Amino acid sequence: MPRTDPARRAAFDVLRAVADRDAYANLLLPALLTERGITGRDAAFATELTYGTLRGQGSYDAILSACSDRPVGRLDPEVRDILRLGAHQLLGTRTGAHAAVATSVDLTRQVRGHRPAGFVNAVLRRVSTRDLATWLDLVAPDRGTDEIGYLSVRHSYPRWIIEAYRAALAGRSDELEPALAAGNTRPDVTLAILPVQRSGTEVDEGDEPPPGTARARWSPFGVVLAGGGDPGELIATRRAAVQDEASQLVALALTRASLRTETKRAATTGHWLDLCAGPGGKTRLLSHLARRENARLLAVELHPHRAGRVKEALSRAAWPDAAGHADPPDDGVVVADGLRPAWQQARFDRVLADVPCTGLGSLRRRPEARWRKSPDDLPGLTSLQRGLLNAAIDSALAGGVVAYVTCSPHVAETRDIVAAVVAGRTDVELLDAPAYLPEVPDLTTPGEPRFAQFWPHRHGTDAMFLALIRRS
């Protein structure tokens, strides 16, 4: 039997794990590469094959169906994933046609035997007769009669996500296609670096960023890794962690929103709450910001394994003491359900509710999410989101501030949730979120300028939503 090269086999195994057990490619792939000792160019190729195939799956399936005597959905799952990998090599990389077809046939023989290998060979040879642009012209529906279908095939999205993006961009229809295209681009590696001294007000303010990085556009804590390199060394040697710039900015906005004078604490310890803390990226930054204001942070996470990741993230927010030893933050992490508070109500000055959502705003980083989620997920999620936002408000002091955050632009998870909760209460005041991020342009949303919405095509960040609410 032929031996498949390690990079292609790793990509195939990740695709199977994503399909069979809902694995997350961004978590599984690095672990698999490390376990199998795949490094350098092979690791980069495996990464491109995995993410490129997942991003382009919708387009490739339409092309493969045109080159096969049966729909892609009726194929053996393993054969289907091999065909998708082969199609991406042929249409989305510089891999030569012969190598792409031959290695796909070898992989088929290894995992499924000789008989399906002939089918894979025939289909991929047909795919290799045209380039991607020509194929898309042939298989995409007519834009004039089915614009959603056209964009679905052209940009590889399920129809319902395109409809959700269009609703979120109401009145700015010219941005729909750029938003879809931006969701298929490889994101920059952005990190948040905390000051190395207690007296630091921002990240090395006035200093040059670390070698191999450039400053992020707006976050005082953010740096961008030049050339898409490996952030491992920077994380190991500095107080750094990978974090999208929008994630940094929504946490910063919460701390900038002014409290009512009656809630300000003189020479006492304030209390902040992170209601849905896992996996801990925003918690880590909030911990630093809380300590600057003499406040303690309580981080809440429902799942024990994610709570463990929160604790690990907080350990990386430790200040070095005079001897260089870590001085852990005096924060707490509890395993609890945000809908059933295990803490005193009306206690916290600032509350972050970064609620579970469809994740449609992070498709650049998690391309499989577009195929994993469906409109059927929304009713359960929106019910949970309303409950968590109400719990967050109940946890805030009178005059305290709550940040409602989702990594999604879907109107049902963003504007509709906040509008419904605010309309149903008499003890809240909606704040002007974009005003607390004046350095970031074009954040306002259609119909309600007090909400903030980040977009990949506008800001180069995840499509993150922010609403700020003060309890009155």
Image (cartoon, rainbow, N blue to C red):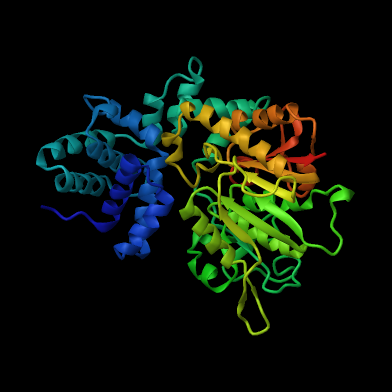
Q: How many marks?
A: 0
Above or below 455: residue 344: below
Q: Is residue 116 visible?
A: yes
Residue 222, x across and y down, in percent: 65, 59
Q: Is 104 left, or right, of 140 in this rendering?
A: left
Residue 225 in sight in this render: no
Left-right relation of 444 to 329: right
Q: Which residue lies most toward the top here?
A: 145
| Residue drawn at point x = 53 percent, y = 35 percent | 180
Image height of 162 relative to 303, above or below: above
Coordinates of residue 64 in the picture (x, y in percent): 29, 31
Which image quarter is the C terminus in? top right
Residue 296 in picture, x, y percent from top left: 70, 60
Query: Residue placed at 35% from the left, 49% from the top?
Result: 49
Q: Is residue 114 depicted above or below 187 in this figure?
A: above
- Could you say which quadrant of the image residue 334 lies in? bottom right
> Residue 179: horizontal and vertical position, in percent?
57, 36
Q: State the residue lying farthest toward the bottom.
A: 323
Q: In the displayed structure, does residue 109 sit left or right of residue 465?
A: left
Relative horizontal placement of residue 6, taking residue 172 as reference (left or right): left
Which is more toward the observer, 17 or 152? 17
